[in-house]
Amino acid sequence: MAPGGPALLLLLLLLLPLPPLPGLPPRAAGCPVACRCYSATVECGALRLRVVPLGIPPGTQTLFLQDNNIARLEPGALAPLAALRRLYLHNNSLRALEAGAFRAQPRLLELALTSNRLRALRSGAFAGLAQLRVLYLAGNQLARLLDFTFLHLPRLQELHLQENSIELLEDQALAGLSSLALLDLSRNQLGTISREALQPLASLQVLRLTENPWRCDCALHWLGAWIKEGGQRLLSSRDKIMCAEPPRLALQSLLDISHSSLICIPPSVHVQPLELTANLGEDLRVACQASGYPQPLVTWRKMPQPREGRPRAQAQLEGGAPVLGGHSASDTGSGMLFLSNITLAHAGKYECEASNAGGAARVPFRLLVNASRQQPQQPQQPAQPPLPAARPAGREPRPVAGSMAFRALGLATQTAIAAAIALLALTAVLLAAMICRRRRRRKKARGPPGEGALFVNDYLDGPCTFAQLEELRDERGHEMFVINRSKPLFAEGPAEAPADCDPAEGATPGLRVPPPVAYEIHC
């Protein structure tokens, strides 16, 4: 080998690219951190992502974003991915889809949104997906499918809506799905479905309706007949439509029930009163009670005004959407018409309508508005009559409650006088209570135990007077009185009553007692 040959060989080995190690996929240039990128596929699953990662190659055709924490598709997050064919967003936390969220993916064929937290779908949520073939929406929290929700999916072939909480499928909810071959509505809360809802599905081949609480009434006449006439081919042998109500038909198959058993009770509607008069600025609620089977749908309508150019009244159903004159909103069961801050525009005729599969009933209601707004009473200043010249100041006669002069006073003045009288009465009651309480305390007050005993020496020499008694104490400290005969029977002048004399006995402390009065104690 020529001199320098080993060094030259080592240099060539360092410059040559090394092949990838076995088990590791090749990493494309610009691949997001922690994601795995192939030629046209990017895998970013189970990475606890909250948003769509940046830096995804524009040529990506398949994008896996499953098992993350994505709660919202930011506007423009998918804009660079115009070549995307398949997008998997299942097992995330999506709560809503913004209108036009997928407008930049015109080539998308498959979209998986299974097991998210979607509660509603807007009509423009799937705008731009003209090539979409498969849409997975199972395992969400959808409750209603509104009209024209899937209008922008003309080539959709599979629509998976199982395991939601769908209880209402509006008549035009599936409009535009003329290419749909599979519709899965199993394990929802559907009680009924209309013929109009399935009419747009001209290419339907598989229909799954099992595990729904079907209400077997006259509204499902068509479904039983349709299945028997040819719709059975769309249902598998295990797909049975079982009734949940009424109770007499519970747990029975719809196909085993005769048409005469599928009945409805037409609605009856009641509004009381049929006419009301309201004042300007007031709030008003009018209840429309409806009954029937199935439970009727209640709708309030403001009838057209007789004169053009008059502003329309605005009504609102309690818990519902606003209602403008000529339009309506509905509420199941007992509908409540709520009018706030009544104006002259609210006056007019209204109509409450209750409808179900058995028919409809209507009741008119008239609202009159009092044009004169009631103003709050302002306190009036009492008129002061001219003072007579001979009457000194401060001698004006005060008005007595109930008299004409008192009623002529303003509301504030009457209230002040009544409050003053009440305060004086309360003060008198409190003073009387305090006086009685002090008297009771004096009667009940006693000295320490043992000091209340009275010991009188019995000299057996006739009567003695109170003035002849002297107060002493024995060895134990008890009170005792000793007769002193050297004192005269009566005091020669007026004497004060003893301080410890009980007022109840007839003597009052501090008052002088006349000489003829004597208290005789037999000793």
Image: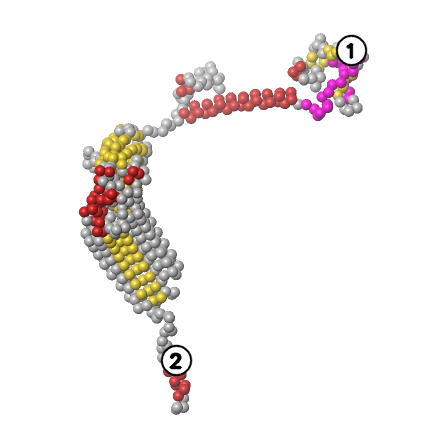
Q: Quadrant of the N terminus?
A: bottom left
Tell me the SS state at disc 2.
Answer: helix
Q: Residue at x 26, y 29 (%)?
A: 274
- Tell me if I can see residue 321 in this picture: no
Q: Position of residue 445 (x, y in %)?
A: 66, 23
Instruction: Between residue 398 and residue 80, name the one nearer to us.
Output: 80
Q: Mark 1 = which residue? A: 488
Q: Residue at x 37, y 80 (%)?
A: 15
Vertical order, 409 against 79 (above or below)? above
Q: How many numbered marks are there?
A: 2
Magenta stretch, residue numbers:
446-473
Q: Position of residue 329 (x, y in %)?
A: 26, 40
Q: Which amino acid is tagged 2?
A: Leu
Q: Which amino acid is tagged 1?
A: Pro
Q: Residue at x 41, y 25 (%)?
A: 411
Rendered image coloring scheme: secondary structure
- Any mark on residue 245, and which? none
Residue pushed farthest bottom? 2
Q: Position of residue 321 (x, y in %)?
A: 29, 41
Separation of marks 1 and 2 at Cα, in angstroms: 147 Å
Residue pushed farthest right? 486
Classify mark 2: residues with Cα within 10 Å, few (<14), some (14-19) or many (20+): few
Instruction: Between residue 376 and residue 69, name the one nearer to us.
Output: 69
- Tell me if I can see residue 414 in this picture: yes
Asked if residue 312 is among those painted magenta in the image, a careful observer would answer: no
Instruction: Between residue 519 and residue 299, name the one nearer to us.
Output: 299
Vertical order, 157 against 281 (above or below)? below
Q: Mark 2 = which residue? A: 14
Q: Quadrant of the C terminus?
A: top right
Vertical order, 55 against 8 (above or below)? above
Tell me the SS state at disc 1.
Answer: loop
Classify mark 1: residues with Cα within 10 Å, few (<14), some (14-19) or many (20+): few
